[in-house]
Image: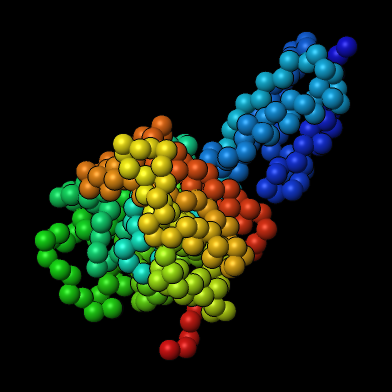
Amino acid sequence: MSFTKEQILDALKHVDDPDLKKDLVTLKMIENIKIEGKKVTFDLVLTTPACPLKDLMQKDCEKAIHEHVDKDIEVTVKMESKVSSRRKETELLLKGVKNIIAVASGKGGVGKSTVSANLAVALAKTGAKVGLLDADIYGPSVPLMFNLEGMHPQGKEVDGKTKIIPMEQYGVKVLSIGFFVDATQALIWRGAMATNALNQLINDADWGELDYFIIDLPPGTGDIHLTMVQTLPVSGAVIVSTPQEVALADARKAFSMFKTKDINVPILGLVENMAWFTPDELPNNKYYIFGKDGAKKLAEESNVVLLGQIPLVQSIREAGDEGSPAALDEDSVEGKAFMALAQSVAQQTAIRNANLEPTKIVEITTH
């Protein structure tokens, strides 16, 4: 029995993207159908290379063709990806960047920079093009975490202007104020100086084409946060907290900042860092030294997604201090946790792009 491309497409109309709730044909995710005898191959074009459901979707495609066309067809599904975006084409700043993701926390000490660095590395390991901006002007840690201390980015001429070329490490383009100041000296800057420095790292750098641009914000809710939303159309925010109540109280403040009417940046979800302690010698043991599931309960209470729970493991801290992020080792407990986090963030970004309007640059007129 022979079959046609139309029959294959009709069969695949029975397969929905689990996140976007529409069939793959309507979503134009099926490309390059080729038929040879009893064999069919086609591309399944995902909204992100970090899609956590790709194996399920592949099996659903095979099942649909066997059920609706012929059970003896040999089906080969090739996974491709085109990262989705909801940015307007008229926007000139960071024009080649598809998604701008802010990583924030209500307070310091919850591991926000560790989460930012490992999220960027994990996304890059899936094949995505990733940039990381260290916007923590007063406490830059990205140079240390990426083993780039003492390095100084170069410049190049672009349309008559000198542009900073971000450093590249572990597949991630990186910039930080830490590349331009003495790491042993405290930055004693007024707010305007800090925001000017951030603007330069955004406006005067050649970031090129990126699927995900991660911005590691300073803790709290202040000038840097306002500068960012007034400069860039942020796709969504990721909030980092630890499980104990004092951190959760500040995480609620971060939620409220992004949700205010003037700012209105979608919250992609909450990350519970230091969710439990696991000693190296007892890898199957979990000790909830900061309390259990505090951020999980806050996510449910706030109606946001719990993007991941990252264990407190000594090797995460050591990896950061040594400039080799834990996400580089995909087989470790912590590496798996960060890869799962990257998949969740990519998944929620794709859902956000499918269901919400583009985020606008914020215009705040009140003081």
Quadrant of the rendering where the C terminus is positioned: bottom left
Which residue corresponds to the image point at 47% horizontal and 88% vertical from the top-left? 366
Q: Nearer the viewer, residue 287 or 363?
A: 287
Residue farthest to the bottom? Answer: 367
Q: Position of residue 14 (x, y in %)?
A: 82, 36
Q: How many marks?
A: 0
Q: Position of residue 192 (x, y in %)?
A: 28, 78
* Quarter-of-image position of residue 280: top left
Q: Position of residue 205 (x, y in %)?
A: 33, 56
Q: Nearer the viewer, residue 68 or 289?
A: 289
**Residue 216 in sight in this render:** no
Q: Nearer the viewer, residue 2 or 240?
A: 240
Vertical position of residue 205 compared to residue 127: above or below: below
Which residue corresponds to the image point at 54% horizontal and 38% vertical from the top-left? 49
Q: Nearer the viewer, residue 114 or 192?
A: 114
Which residue corresponds to the image point at 28% horizontal and 53% vertical from the top-left? 142
**Residue 2 in sight in this render:** yes
Q: In the image, 329: left or right of 20?
A: left
Q: Position of residue 341 (x, y in %)?
A: 48, 47
Which residue corresponds to the image point at 36% horizontal and 76% vertical from the top-left? 223
Give the colour scheme of this rendering.
rainbow
* Quarter-of-image position of residue 354: bottom right
Quadrant of the rendering where the N terminus is positioned: top right
